Image: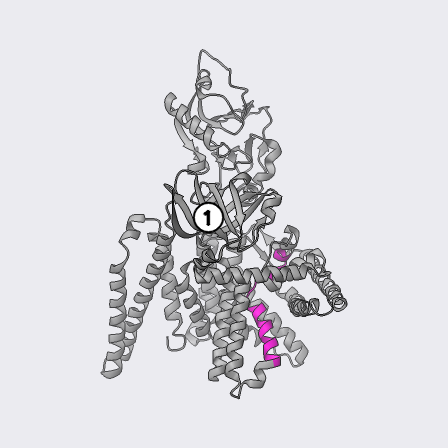
Amino acid sequence: MHKYPAFWVVLPLALGITLSEVFLCNEEQIISLVGWPFVGIALFCLMIAVYVFVLRTHTRLSLYKGQRRFVLGVTLFFTILGVLLNVRMWSKDDVYWPEETTYYKGVLLQTPRKTQRSVQCDVLLQSYKVDSTLKTINTPIRLVLPRTQKSDCLEVGMGISFHGRVERIRNSGNPDEFNYARYMRYNGFVGTALVWNSAWNSFELAEHDRQKLPWLERLRIETLQIRNSWVKLYQGSSLHSDALAIMTALTLGERSMLTNELSKLYSDTGATHLLALSGFNLGILMMLFNLFLLRYVRDCGWRWPVTLSLMLLIWGYTFLTGLPSSLVRASIMCTFMLGAVLLRRQSITLNTLALAGGLMLVVNPYYLFDVGFQLSFMAMWGILTLQPRLESVLKVSYPCLRTLWKLFTVSLAAQICTAPIVMYVFHSLPIYASLLSLVLIPLTSVLIYGALLLSILQSIWSPLSDFASQMLNLFVDVQTFVMRWGASLPYANIEGVYITLLHILLAYLLIILWMQDKGRIIRVRNGLTCLLLGVMIVCSVVTNRLDRVGDDVVFYNNRNCPAVHIILSPERSYLLCANPDSMTHLAYIEETYWKRRLKSQPLLLPDEYKDSFVQNHNGLLLSPHVSVLMLCDNRWYATISEHKMLVDYLHICKGFRGTLRSISKAFRPKCVVLDASLTPYYRNKYAKEAEEVGWDIYDMHELGALKIECK
């Protein structure tokens, strides 16, 4: 505690946020009760802690007992504070949206992201109409527009109005799916809307509307507009497409220009952190400032105005890039470092890292669940604690080799301490990342310095800027060549790694164990290592058994490709698809579910198919445990039978235009599954018809994918 007191603040704070997220934030009634009682308990714990601390210093109370009680009081206080902060964020996210189509008005917060068919806009809603009166709000939503010439002209800071229906963000509910709703909530978005081209308009935001924005959002919009001007400056140079994408990502955090191939190349070689704005980027800028300014004013009166100016520049750059969590952490630590320069103290310590994390969590508890935040802090923790131990393993005499060895150990320490999170989130592990960093980090440093030089030359003399662009193109080509070579090495990237939270906990306990240098721990370290590894193996075996699938039926929630998956075993499964030509829309399900749970791809059923396990006739699928009739056209519309066939599920998809009364003349389903591909009109129509006939209804738009375990 005496050595790292800041950890006794940030760890209980993170614990309280996690506990509230797991146990409280899904219960609306509990959330409404959490408030002043918790504040009172937290203040009481803090008062007891301070009282014990004062008592310990002024009486003969046992030092050990007094310290324990003080730590307990502080821990309880910050744990309860974490609960309160997270519950407060949940209450802010609890927004009521009108059920009917309504008029909304807002402002674009980010540069719109363009795909082949749509444009995604982050909009801060300022008002909406209720009973002919405008109600004021300040709530961010994700707005999706069709890709047209009109939507391509949208820019950050523009006003936008639309008639539509805003809904809360839902997950599709498909097995092993990424929790998109939770991800959006952690990023501050509490609603989404899909609006057609004729139902929206853009306009220049009036000054009085701009002044109504929160000051932080107003400042962010202004800095992002400056960033767009900088991007246009890059676009006016002679950089080729890959170089332009890498330059904008490295210096401005604008990654929309990166192709999928280039992003995968960085991922396979473990170099994605170079594109993520973090302490590496700020470290290069700080080296530049130190070279030309800071080292000359450390011991004179000029250090105050110079250092304060550098702080403003650092935070201005952070706002310019859109406040990513990893760069916010680095900016806080750089601020502490510059403050240490002013006070002539040691700059970067574990206390500085913990204090930066604590400040970020107090401002926004959702940072704790941001992958960039987690990777950034674990990498910095590894550099501060593990890197000195790795560097001391080998004594290098030559200065050049010593620098390379230090660079390698820094990268290796960061990779070791982030590997558990990388495997859990991305299900892969790049092996040669530390070796490739010996080449990629110097090249990236040159690219960042070259980008700054290009920005200056672009406005001074065009021939020099063209020469600088060609040199940057050359360095980017060298960098991509090195990455392609690294990705081609055997076992360059181990994919298909699936671990649990228990694996992560055990892995970090193992890392912490081997960081200890106390005699008692060293004597039992080998035994504890074997114990932890044994628990990991048992956990892996149990997880493997639980992950096995068989005798399952899954109705996938995908509006572009309705499909039913009959799984008999990991080796044998069948897929009934409404439109086989749209199978590409199931690619993400293949990546997240099929590759993990199945040993072979499912067999895509044609209109007529029969084997010893299943039979399909024009969408009527019969399997050992379930029968399904998929209606995606009118081929069964006029069917009449004296003996109605009993089917388990009637799956209605886009393309069916008949009535359920006509279907009831030949079939008697136990449940009607309304696919997400249906429009609201047809979804409501078939729901009413099913109620009239007396059939049960499962609405995939509201309830998500349907999975039936037939075991």
Q: Quadrant of residue 263?
A: bottom right
Q: Amino acid at mark 1?
A: Lys
What is the image's colouring? one colour
Image position of 311 with respect to 203: above or below:
below
The residue to which callout 1 is attached is 105
Q: Check if residue 270 falls in the magenta segment.
A: yes
Q: Position of residue 566 (x, y in %)?
A: 51, 32
The residue lying toward the viewer, choosing from 568 and 163, is 163
Q: Quadrant of residue 279?
A: bottom right
The residue lying toward the viewer, choosing from 293 and 564, is 293
Q: Check if residue 212 falls in the magenta segment.
A: no
Image position of 214 with respect to 543: above or below:
below
What span is colored magenta in the figure? 266-292
Q: Residue at the spot x=39%, y=67% of the render?
A: 10
Q: Position of residue 414 (x, y in %)?
A: 55, 66
Q: Position of residue 473 (x, y in %)?
A: 73, 62
Q: Residue at the spot x=46%, y=30% of the render?
A: 681
Would residue 313 appear left or right of 436 to someone viewing this image? left
Q: Position of residue 392 (x, y in %)?
A: 56, 77
Q: Secondary structure at mark 1?
A: strand
Q: Quadrant of residue 453?
A: bottom right
